[in-house]
Amino acid sequence: MTSRCRVVVIQMGRAPEDISRVFGDQGEWFKRALASENVEIAVVSPADGQTLPNVEDFDLAILSGSWSMVTDREDWSEITKKWILEVLPTGKHMLGVCYGHQLMADALGGHVDYHPRGREIGLKTVTLTDAALQDPLLSTFPQSFEANLSHEQTVVSPPPGAVVLAHSDHDPHQILRYGPTAFSVQFHPEFTPPLMKACVTRRADALRRNGLDVEEIVQQLKPAHEAHRLMQAFLRQAFTR
């Protein structure tokens, strides 16, 4: 094992130009979010034709969020889905975030589709299930914490054998565990308030048409420390294994 945890961020597509111009693409968000950790981070973008890494080349793989939809079945996404199925049996640590959460569930036999109640966006409360009390990663976390969310699709039905570890009022599957080293979250632990605000305000008109109060969503934004700490804890678990 190297002296630093080797993290590879599998960047699922690219951020819109107005977002990437200010904040960079998804890989950059994780680099900044984990900058205080003892890590070396590589970013691989299958949407740009880049080859997905071999399992011996990383300690932890993070599957990022995306502006694409899992049900679009884009070629690069389907290639990544096959890669997920190749990596998981090796015991390498894998963390799915938002789109990555849904893609992991889809790969393992779950059902992903548009959320029947529409979009979930902004800073929301995530509540742990009873199963989380026994989970090696979550047992020390508060029963409820705040997290940044922005998604239209969801894991409608988890894959067989997956354990549901958290929910929100809107979405029953906020955290899923698929095994000792495979874990995914619907929320964005890498988001900062400015990035979340940019994601909200760029689609303000559509949100208002859907009956959402954009100003209230923006006013409620603040750092989601526990969600960020959860990502850090999973990284450290991968490195100390």
Image (cartoon, rainbow, N blue to C red):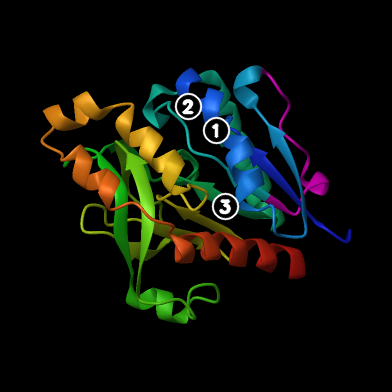
User: What is the magenta range?
Assistant: 49-60
Residues marked 3 and 1 touching at CB (< 8 Å): no
Q: Kindly identify which numbered label has been placed on residue 23.
A: 1
Label 2 to label 3: alpha-carbon separation: 23 Å
Q: Secondary structure at mark 3?
A: strand
Label 3 to label 1: alpha-carbon separation: 22 Å
Between residues 105 and 37, which one lies in front from this camera angle?
A: 37
**Disc 2 target residue:** 19
Mark 3 or 1, nearer chain start = 1
Reply above or below: 131 against 33: below
Q: Kindly identify which numbered label has been placed on residue 205.
A: none
Few, some or many C-alpha atoms within 10 Å of disc 2 (few <14, some 14-19, many ≥20)? some
Place of residue 196 in the rendered image (x, y in percent of width and height, measured from the top left): 40, 42
Instruction: Give the amino acid at mark 2.
Output: Ile
Residue at 75% x, 64% y is: 239
**Disc 3 target residue:** 95
Mark 2 or 3, nearer chain start = 2
Reply above or below: 141 against 90: below
Label 1 to label 2: alpha-carbon separation: 6 Å
Count up the numbered dots: 3
Residues marked 1 and 2 touching at CB (< 8 Å): yes
Secondary structure mostly seen in magenta is loop
